[in-house]
Amino acid sequence: MEANDFDKLIQIQVEIADQILSIENEIKYYERLEQDLVIKRDRELHKQILGCKDEKVETEFAIHYIQVKLQQKRELFHHLTKAFQHRSEEYIETIYG
């Protein structure tokens, strides 16, 4: 394997790692949003019990939206992690295989 091939591998790995870090940050963001919305829903349930105006439906939709986004981000994170691992294994195979 030539140095140029190694440089290409490193460049690809760096790009994948950057994407992984970005997705991790997005996952953390959506997890915080989900947590905030769950707390809001709990407050609205208490208000509903006390007979106050119902905003719970909007919160439920927001929670569902956030959960869908989280699932998408987690799937992308899993895919990128696998790609990173696959590229590394591919490189090792070419050197030692």
Image (cartoon, helix red, strand yellow):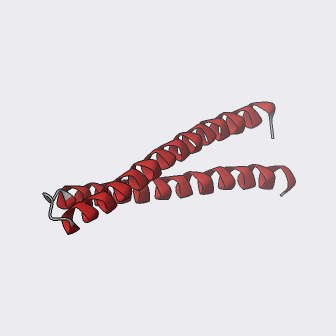
State the image quarter where residue 6 is shown. top right
Q: Residue at x 26, y 65 (%)?
A: 45
Nearer the observer, 58 or 16: 58
Q: Residue at x 37, y 53 (%)?
A: 69
In the rendered image, the residue lying farthest to the bottom is: 49
Left/right of residue 31 with respect to residue 7 in the rendered view: left
The one nearer the camera, 73 or 93, is 73
Is residue 51 found left or right of 38 in the rendered image? Answer: left
Name the residue nearer the viewer: 57 or 16. 57
**Residue 9 location, quadrant:** top right
User: Is residue 22 positioned above or below 66 on the image?
Assistant: above
Which residue sits at x=42%, y=55%? 35
User: Number of labelled discs?
Assistant: 0
In the rendered view, does 94 fall on the left or right side of 21? right
Q: Is residue 82 left or right of residue 37?
A: right
* Residue 7 picture location, percent across and down: 73, 32
Residue at the farthest front position: 50
Q: Tell me the quarter of the image containing the C terminus.
A: bottom right
Which residue shows up at 65% across the image and 36% down it? 14
Q: x and y percent of residue 75 in the render?
A: 48, 59
Instruction: Give the x, y percent position of residue 24.
Output: 55, 46
Quadrant in which the N terminus appears: top right
Q: Is residue 1 above or below residue 71?
A: above
Residue 84: % across, % down: 65, 50
